[in-house]
Amino acid sequence: MYTIVNGVIDTITITGNDIPFGHPSGLWRPPEPFVNGFPDWEEFNNMCKEYPGLEKVYEHMKAYYNMCKDDWESKKKDDEG
């Protein structure tokens, strides 16, 4: 959607998160998994069923992420107060 004010485009609104903006090439490209986006969730889950090692690594990554997130949140609270 865009807004035209006095014959000039004033505002451009883009919704959704499937088109990254500002790619170095200047082109609009779909996100690349684990580069500038996450893989398709359904496809990733299907891959985990097919490859048990991927599922195990994913479970470890979630646990590590949660530990880091807890530490991150506590540091933010310390900085605020």
Image (cartoon, rainbow, N blue to C red):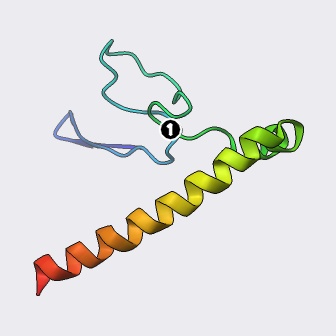
Q: On the image, which quarter does residue 63 sit in?
A: bottom right
Above/below status of 76 relative to 1: below
Q: Is residue 40 left or right of residue 12?
A: right
What residue is disc 1 on? 37
Taking the spot 33% from the left edge, 12% from the top edge, the residue there is 25
What SS does tag 1 mark? loop
In the figure, is residue 5 to the left or right of 60? left
Q: Residue visible at 51% across and 47% down? A: 16
* Outermost residue toward the bottom in this view: 81
Q: Is residue 29 visible in the rendered structure shown here?
A: yes
Q: Quadrant of residue 26?
A: top left
Front residue of this view, candidates 9 and 23: 23
Whether residue 44 is visible: no
- Residue shown at 41%/43% (left/top)? 14
Give the residue type that dot 1 points to. Answer: Gly
Q: Residue at x 42, y 33 (%)?
A: 20
User: Is residue 31 depicted above or below 27 in this figure?
Assistant: below
